[in-house]
Amino acid sequence: MATRISPFDGRAVADIGDIPINPYSLDKSIRIIEDCFDPIFASGCKPLGLGGDHTIVLPILRSAFKTHGPVGVIHVDAHSDINDTMFGEKIAHGTPFRRAYEEGLIEPSKVFQIGLRGTGYSAEDFDWSRKKGFTVVQSEECWHKSLAPLMDDIRSRMGKSPVYLSFDIDALDPSVAPGTGTLEIGGLTIIQAMEIIRGCAGMNVIGGDMVEVSPPYDNNGTTATIAANLAFEMLCSFGRD
Ligand SMILES: [Mn+2]
């Protein structure tokens, strides 16, 4: 009601179903995901992907690059997801933004990582992002305040560039969204999440995702419900650029 946007009235919104990944091969699965997104981006549609874990953003960004070139990214997450490897593997849910950087899929000066926090592996965990030109907005910088001014700043810095919004549900505080695998205390509020998503209106958003919701951990279903509502907010926001 607040945005006065009714995305199902003004736009053609369709659920195109699940992507038929190969559960026995991660390499094949990410190729399948990329192949499935290619015609979506090429046709001018704005995909809203529902994870799955954060691994899916790498093949999505590979696909987006073919249509849009390097994109800006608003990455909302407790974690930076810029590890070089996890258990020796280059493709994992904690590595996609390092791969995307290495492959030139993203414009580093237009990458904003919001909500990062936690114990981490070392005190320098987030410095790799900063050294590469990303803007890191740690969760502590978000505490007790509206994020609308931050989004105003990001909007002006994005300009007309294509922007991809990637939202890990663990960006939210675990007291409100516990149904995910890697909880970190001191997270964002739902209102701040709405400010971020609504703040994307006016940007050239080319797609987005909602990832890391884990039904086995979601004991009463509220995390999935919150994710669904935030996905709806994205549909409203994507329609306003
Ligand atoms: Mn995360």
Image (tube, rainbow, N blue to C red):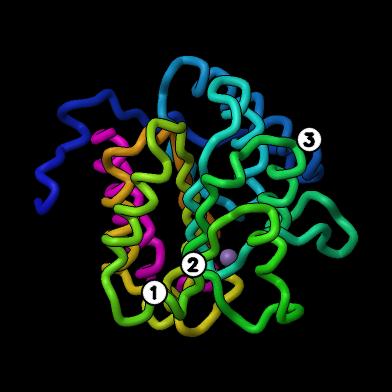
Q: Are marks 3 and 1 in contact (CB under 8 Å)?
A: no
Residue 42 in the image: state x and y as whole percent.
52, 16
Mark 3 or mark 1, earlier in chain:
3
* Alpha carbon distance from label 3 to label 1: 38 Å
- Identify the element where label 2 is drawn: strand
Mark 2 vs mark 3, foreground winner is 2
Mark 2: C-beta under 8 Å from nearest atom of ligand 1: no
Amino acid type of the residue tagged 1 in the rendering? Cys
Residue that mark 3 sits on: 28
* Alpha carbon distance from label 2 to label 1: 8 Å
Say if 193 sits above or below 184 in the image: above
Residue 86 occupies which quadrant of the picture?
Answer: bottom right
Neighbour tally class for label 2: few under 14, some 14-19, many 20 plus, Cα within 10 Å:
some
Mark 3: C-beta under 8 Å from nearest atom of ligand 1: no
Q: Considering the whole magenta stretch, tell me its main secondary structure.
A: helix
- Identify the element where label 1 is drawn: helix
Residue 130 in the image: state x and y as whole percent.
64, 61
Q: Tell me, yes or no, if residue 214 can be seen here.
A: no
Front-lying residue, 67 or 50: 67
Residue appearing at x 48%, y 40% in the figure: 164
Front-lying residue, 208 or 199: 199
What range is drawn magenta here?
A: 214-241
Residue 87 occupies which quadrant of the picture?
Answer: bottom right
Residue that mark 1 sits on: 142
Mark 2 or mark 3, earlier in chain:
3
Amino acid type of the residue tagged 3 in the rendering? Lys
Residue appearing at x 62%, y 45% in the figure: 56
Residue appearing at x 41%, y 30% in the figure: 46
Residue at the far top in the pictured view: 43
Q: Are marks 2 and 1 in contact (CB under 8 Å)?
A: yes
Mark 3 vs mark 1, foreground winner is 1
